[in-house]
Image (cartoon, grey):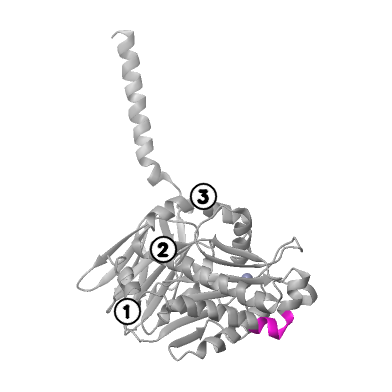
């Protein structure tokens, strides 16, 4: 055997060895590396159910819909189930019989939804903590009234931002939300709901779940701004979209109750997510949310300036990645009514008359948007594009 043949044989042998090791890697990986499915929860409403699968970190999944019997299942790849959790959940509503979960094979957890009658469903991921959310929509009976869900930020154990003399964001925004509901309730054509009407804690993902369950036409989340720069003041309105803009990132990180580091981590994944989720319905919602944000922001600035001698600072409409807006099935915005950390604005926020004027202004913006809103059917049609 000549030398170069020997070398050839050796390199082929080495290549085969590496190939075998490479192919074995998935099987050699210790179980500790698998994503852990550590809880499954659900919220059930008349015409909508949200199932939340808690996982230890981001995971990939494959979804399938089967007929006879009607089932939807998710295979969560490279995962194992925490044996302690409830794996057989009874829902028993119009849409679902229940949810079952189990270890399908060594590296796959399968979650099965046993369905009754559904119109469509959608699945998406939420971060920090990682969750897979399955929204299931029932056959809706449309009412001719416009439905508005108002969300007062924070509450209960979460005070939100804290201003001078312990002025709490959760209290200020609850009062504005209640006033806004009253203001909107003057219109016979509206049905208005609050995500909370008292000082209680509600998880962020439950707030949009409430809006979805009401089959709302729009969702408005009310917040007060905060900054370590005490001089910063003004009003701004956000709609859901990714941005790298530093100040908007800070606002979103604070409202999401996560660090800037976690916020940037989400940013790195955003491009992939954007492409994945870039469906018609999403573009439609983004454009409508942008429109709604402009109506609300402009109305606030104009109406408040009429009363407060043009002293209101207009920070404009911005994009932001707020958890509370993710998964909302309708045009939705988050309003930062003023800075609770600014002495002047904190003083205003304490005043009943200022809160009243804020509520009146936001209502005025909503009314203007409602007068140009496309028919509800358009929303439903857009939703259909998500069906399997
Ligand atoms: Zn807030």
* In this view, 3 is above or below 259: above
Q: Is 80 displayed left or right of 1 in the figure?
A: right
Return the disc, 3 or 1, that comes first in the chain's sequence: 1
Q: Looking at the picture, how far across and down is residue 280, in whole percent?
A: 34, 62
* Chief SS of the magenta region: helix
Q: Quadrant of ligand 1?
A: bottom right
x%, y% of residue 223?
62, 73
Residue at point 42% right, 72% down? 330
Q: CA distance from mark 2 to mark 1?
A: 18 Å
Q: Which residue range is magenta in the image?
A: 350-356
Q: Do the numbered discs 3 and 1 sit on residues whose CB atoms are within 8 Å?
A: no
Q: Residues within 10 Å of mark 2 (few under 14, many from 20)?
A: some
* Residue at numbered disc 1: 138
Q: Is residue 291 above or below residue 96?
A: above
Q: Which residue is mark 2?
A: 124
Q: Are marks 3 and 2 in contact (CB under 8 Å)?
A: no
**Quarter occupied by the C terminus:** bottom left
Q: Is residue 46 above or below residue 129?
A: below
Q: Which mark is residue 268?
A: 3
* Ligand 1 is within 8 Å of the C-beta of the residue at disc 2: no
Give the residue furthest to the right.
165
On whether residue 351 falls in the magenta region, the answer is yes
Q: Locate residue 317: give its quadrant.
A: bottom right
Element type at marker 3? helix
Marks 3/1: CA–CA distance: 35 Å
Q: Quadrant of the N terminus?
A: top left
Residue 299 spot, x, y in % from top left = 57, 74
């Amino acid at each position: 055997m000549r030398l170069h043949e020997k070398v050839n044989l050796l390199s082929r042998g080495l290549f085969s060895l590496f190939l075998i090791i490479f192919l074995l890697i998935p099987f050699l990986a210790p179980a500790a590396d698998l994503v852990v499915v550590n809880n499954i929860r659900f919220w059930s409403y008349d015409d909508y159910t949200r199932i939340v699968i808690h996982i230890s970190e981001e995971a990939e999944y494959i979804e399938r819909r089967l007929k006879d019997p009607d089932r939807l299942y998710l295979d969560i790849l490279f995962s194992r189930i925490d044996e302690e959790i409830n794996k057989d959940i009874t829902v028993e509503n119009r849409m679902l019989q229940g949810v079952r979960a189990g270890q399908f094979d060594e590296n796959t957890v399968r979650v099965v939804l046993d369905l009754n009658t559904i119109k469509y469903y959608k699945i998406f991921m939420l971060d920090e903590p990682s969750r897979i959310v399955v929204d299931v929509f029932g056959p809706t009976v449309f009412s001719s009234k416009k439905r508005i869900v108002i969300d007062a930020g924070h509450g209960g154990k979460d005070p939100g931002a804290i201003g001078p003399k312990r002025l709490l964001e959760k209290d200020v925004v609850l009062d504005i939300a209640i006033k806004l509901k009253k203001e909107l309730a003057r219109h016979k054509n509206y049905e208005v709901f609050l995500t909370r009407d008292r000082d209680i804690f509600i998880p962020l993902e439950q707030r949009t779940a409430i809006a979805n369950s009401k089959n709302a036409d729009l969702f408005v989340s009310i917040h007060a701004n905060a900054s370590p720069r005490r001089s910063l003041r003004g009003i701004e309105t956000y709609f859901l979209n990714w941005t790298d803009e530093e100040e908007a990132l800070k606002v979103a990180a604070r409202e999401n109750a996560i660090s800037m580091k976690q916020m940037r981590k989400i940013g790195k994944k955003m491009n992939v997510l954007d492409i994945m989720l870039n469906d018609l319905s999403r573009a439609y919602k983004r454009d409508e949310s942008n429109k709604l944000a402009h109506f609300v922001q402009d109305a606030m600035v104009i109406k408040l300036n009429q009363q407060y001698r043009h002293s209101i600072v207009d920070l404009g409409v911005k994009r932001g990645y707020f958890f509370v807006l993710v998964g909302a099935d309708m045009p939705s915005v988050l309003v930062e009514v003023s800075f609770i950390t600014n002495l002047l604005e904190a003083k205003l926020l304490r005043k009943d008359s200022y809160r009243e004027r804020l509520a009146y202004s936001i209502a005025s913006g909503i009314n203007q948007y409602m007068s140009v809103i496309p028919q509800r059917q358009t929303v439903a049609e857009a939703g259909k594009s998500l069906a399997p």
